[in-house]
Amino acid sequence: MVCLKKLFAFGVMLSLSVTIGVAGASAEKVLKIGGMAPLTGPSAKTGQEIKQSAEMAFEEAGNMIGDYKVELVWIDSQSDPAKATNAYAEAVERKGIQVGLLNWHSSVAIAVMDLAAKYKIPHLFGIGGSSVINEKYRSDMDKYNGYWLKSWPVPQKTMTGYVEFLEDAIASGKFKPHSKKVVIFAEDTDWGRDIFAGAKKMFGDAGWEIVAEDFLAQNQTEFYPLLTKWKKLEPALVFGSYGMPVGITSLIKQSREVGLKVPMICDGLGWAGEWYSLAGSASDYTLDMIQKLATDKAKAWAANYEKKYGDKPSPSSGGLAYDSAKLFIKVAKRALEKTGKLDSESLRQVVLDELLTGKITYSEDEGAITVSRFSYNEQSLPDPAVGVDDWYLPIIQYKSGKGRIVYPKAWAEAEFHVIQ
Amino acid sequence: MNILETKGVTKRFGGLVAVNDVSLHVEAGEILGLIGPNGAGKTTFQNTVAGLDPPTSGEVYFLGNKVTGFSPQVMCSLGLSRTFQIPRPFPKLTVLENVLVSTVFGNTEPVADKVKHARDKLDFVEFPLGHNVLCETLNTVQLKRLDLARALASSPKLCLLDELASGLSEVELEDIIAIIRKIRDTGVTILMVEHIMQVIMNLCDRLAVISFGNKIAEGPTGEVTKNPKVIEAYLGVEED
Amino acid sequence: MNDSSSAKVIEWLKSAGGITVTCTILVAIAVSFHKGPYVLVNTLVTGGMWALMAIGVSLLFGVMNISNFAHGEYFMIGSLTAYYIMNPLKQYLLETPNDFLSFITPILGIAGAAIVGAIAGIVTDKTIFAQLRKRNREGWLLNCFLITIGIQIILINVHMLVFGNTFKGVVNYWDVPSVAFGDVYVSVDRVVVFGIAMAAIVLFWYLMMYTSLGKKIRAVAQDENGARMVGIQVNGVYSTTFALACGFAALAGGSLLFMFPSYPTVGVAPLYNSWFIIILVGFGNVAGAVPGGFMIALFQVVTRTYMGEGWENVIPMFLIAMILIFKPYGIFATKVRSVWEQ
Amino acid sequence: MTQLTQDNSTGFSGILGKICLSPMGLAGLAILFLLPLVPPFNQDYMIRWLISGAIVAAAAVAFDFSAGYLGIVNFGYAAFIGLGAYTSAIISNKIGISPFITIFAGALVSAGLGVLTGIVSLRLRGMFAICFTWFIGIALMGLCLKLDWLTRGPLGLQCDGFFEGNSSLPYYYLILAIMIFTYLVLGLMIRSDYGLAFRAIGQNMEAAMTSGVHPTKYRVINFTMSCFFAGLIGGFYGHYYGILTPELLHTQKTVEVLVIAYIGGRSSLWGGIVAAFPFIFAMELLRSSLSDLPGINLIIYGVFLIAIMVYYPGGVAQFFKNLTARKQRSTSSTAQKAKTAEAGV
């Protein structure tokens, strides 16, 4: 019987702690922001960077927006849509978040979108870029409009840069491919599938012959069989997107070990800050398309981040999260200015009236570190508008761990070199 | 009538011949004792008959039908049950449930009152404890009785008993002899492997002797025990 | 070769193990002719490491009846140790080049990994399994299995909390050009690591066959009570076994740092591979783990070559399942039945 | 066979006993029914937690049906859940039938694979059987990733919900019904002769065979039933969360169910249900209140799991068994003593 009593006491404590959690409101003006990121699970590294970068942005604003104190509530998506929805609902109901910010996995986005619409919580600037989110968003615009926004457009929209760049390099005589054979690979994720479909079409249209197509597992490290297979095919170019630091760096290292000497486009190589400590000089001359991080402000941010957290930030997760948070602060300030208060409703109104109509933008001049300008319009939704003056990724070539922009011409910092 | 007959049953394990060309028969209603020195292949022979280890070659006939290599559960439903030298009960089931397994699945005709049937068998072997005891708490002697009750619960025609009496005290021996006799009186034929002469002399109508896998003698108990080959097998030959 | 030994060889060739090994060799040769010798080289290079992992799992199972689901985490401990030994040294070397030190750095890292792994093994045994042995032997196999799942969860998350989620790796051990076998290039690191794996396996074999420790371990594996009766310190043998098994896993982790940077869940792939191996060759069959390692490596290389990436688990899985149907206790299984069938 | 040994219980609890419930169990179910109507549990996120709990509870019951009684731990269990989920989602997406029907189609497909697995794994025992099911799970997950024209692979398959509207409450009652259905069907089977056969095979295959039990038949039946319910639960999972990814088939998900089933207590069926709800709540609260240290909730979970296995391997079921044993002991002593004992507590 004693044990039963203990059990009962435990139950009482449990429910008490729950009710206390609910009743924890205070008189101060507070805006509760639910930042969502995969803090545990296979993508925890990315999640951590997103979290730290966003926190940096809010700290710089003194954790205040106008007279509202900003309270960041972190929601661990656990890289699992089912668990993420549970955590999200709890964050809304128990912790009272009024607006959602950021996200990584597209599968999580698909599941959480419905919750955001249901609770009428605008969720802004999810990073996960795949087209499934767009499909779902576009399937019921009324329901999701203003409740889900991405900060990374679907990869097909940006990738055409690669082909333009190649055509340009061939035309100018810098790149003389012995054939038009290309090997395409991609990580086996929603992102990889998306980019793969885009690349296939893109290279096909440009008259390339695709001699091998491979999907690579997320944390694969053994590529000797694959690379020797590619080597036999004698391609003139290797193209792929592989955002897993372990995988992409192993691939590059081993490609040099087995003697595969062709220009490699490794989209996603620079996503993780520590890529050079893993790939080393094998990464020289590889090409990537990544957020610029070229301005002084951007470099200062990267230096700050490294000082504060001890490792190199990635422009694509950390940088974008930082920019997203800054853009959010801008939106929130406008909402406060316009309606005199900050809550889900006022934020959504500003998002609908001003952000999505292109009245609010966030550009390099104002401090955006990753792209030229964030702006949204009717056609681009839920993505930001894509273009050289908007959301655009330059092509960079690495040498000794430093990336230099080689395309577009206007931004170029260095000449393109073909690996010898 | 022969209830069981084997013709040239041989069982090999890799290079080892455990049972070699054994032919014998068991007549309905008798108690046949299968004796022999340790490691002679008696248990293996029982296993080949009961279907646990199908013979490498040779044939087994049960009730006149060829049953070579039949699975144990089929042999059980045909009416052949057995006990184990080291009893193997279901440790997490109660005594009653142990016997019920055999009652429910060993009988071809469904038993009307399963519980009563099982309890009857337990009473029949004079099981000393309550019927709701978990088997893992029983000692070897109790387990042997339980195993016997379990074997009987499937209403067998032939029951193979494997060293049922080993490890029992003088008093318990008397009991078990009485029980085995009682079983025979209900019309069940018995093929028993046994070491203890008291049991053999008291119960067995006939004996078959196995040594190093070979059958060396078969016949009425009195004759076989006087057979010089048998005595030699038990005592060994002094060659030098 | 005299008649009796050739008869023995023929007998072995007819057994399931013999047939599988022969088929594997034939497949390897055939594929090498079809696709080039790289198949063979790749199989050898990766097979050695998988064998080293599988030996550990197999040893734990054979001696202690523990099916270790956390074995990959000892691999992770090894790679983490090697990183924290090698990385500072490499940083130091950048500033003050020193040929001897740069030659010896990876060796120090790998040795350190093995030692730390062995210590971690002893700690695990003393804190958890010794307690369980004292308290409760019932349902040992499944209880241990669940406990190792718990250990796995703890180690992964402790790594994450303490050392962070970053990928802690090195570019290479020795910065020298690849070695060429015909037209196949293999990095020096891989060749050396293959050598380490083979050396460790030979050493282990010697340890088990010719030293008193090996004899004690084998005695305990066969009969714990018997071993206790002849005066063997059984608990000590268990700890040693754990140290050996985990030491091997950590050795593999340390040796493969150039390929698997250390991060919380790095152990999952090595764990899976070692489990595939021991299921294929049969539980507790320590010697079988070596050919098993090469077989699995060949399976995966061939699948990747012909089916493409991503199928390397599906097809070998299917094959192993098929083999299990015909040889339910693994291809090298003997007639001896023991506890793991219960 | 428990009804045989508990024939003496009469009246209401006797009737309940016939359908595998005890008064305490009925009270527990009643609480589960009423809980989402009572504050603080009437908030939607709490209902979501309850749903998660019920999903795991139902899965643990069906898992324990093989693991606890037959002794075969189906380590690829999540793959059977996933197979049911994907089948149901694909059928309902392609043909447009109501999910209420397609979840049964999913369950049947899972059961079909269960039959195959049961037959094929027949010769395997112990760890080999466990690993065999595990490999089936891994292979299924690999297929799910690679057959992207059917499953959309890692892109994730979207599925329609059962109900219109935003509330999770109808979903909760649906999964509760599924859970109770699972428990009752499997519980009744365990109480019948089938259960006797399962336990006999699980504890000693050879003795079971010599007692006339047909191992093939009962192993296959057991696997089929267990996988059927796994598929059914999977179907619910898909249509509730609205998205399926191959991760659902991952071994990690099996481990989640397995841990609940074992903490609940092996071969009890109901133990999983008792363990699931508090466990899910505790984990969610830990995760949420320790969100500054992501992963620490999992460390606590790991330590708890090890502690349970070392010090209390019987789990919750053992706890309640000890409790009733103590109660019986105290009631069997004299009334006077019982009274003082009650007063003492």
Image: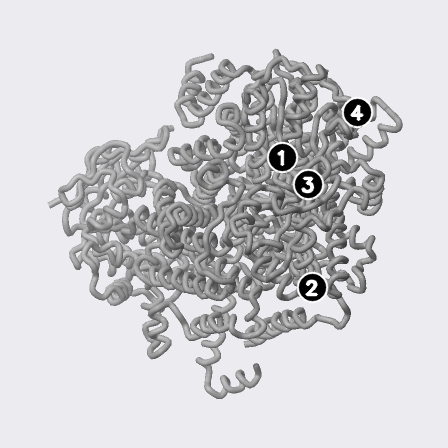
Q: Is residue D195 left or right of residue A133?
A: left
Labels 3 and 4 share a subunit? no
Lower position in the chain sequence, tag 1 or tag 3? 1
- In this view of the protein, which residue sits in the foreground, B22 or A363? A363
Alpha carbon separation for disc pair 3 and 2 = 40 Å
Residue occupied by mark 1: C212
Please tell me whether residue A13 is drawn above or below residue A249 in the rendered image.
Answer: below
Labels 1 and 4 share a subunit? no
Residue occupied by mark 2: A343
Residue occupied by mark 3: C263
Alpha carbon separation for disc pair 1 and 2 = 75 Å
Q: Amino acid at mark 4?
A: Ala
Query: How many residues crowd around disc 3 within 10 Å: few (fewer than 14), some, or many (20 or more)?
Result: many
Labels 1 and 2 share a subunit? no
Q: Quadrant of residue A373?
A: top right
Residue C171 numbered tag: none
Query: How many residues crowd around disc 4 within 10 Å: few (fewer than 14), some, or many (20 or more)?
Result: some
Alpha carbon separation for disc pair 3 and 4 = 35 Å
Q: Amino acid at mark 1?
A: Ser
Lower position in the chain sequence, tag 4 or tag 2? 2
Mark 1 and mark 3 residues within 8 Å of each other at the beta carbon: no
Alpha carbon separation for disc pair 4 and 2 = 47 Å
Q: Residue furthest bottom?
A: D336
Identify the image's colour scheme: rainbow, by chain, secondary structure or one colour: one colour
Q: Specify the subunit that label 3 lies on.
A: C
Badge 1 marks a residue whose secondary structure is helix
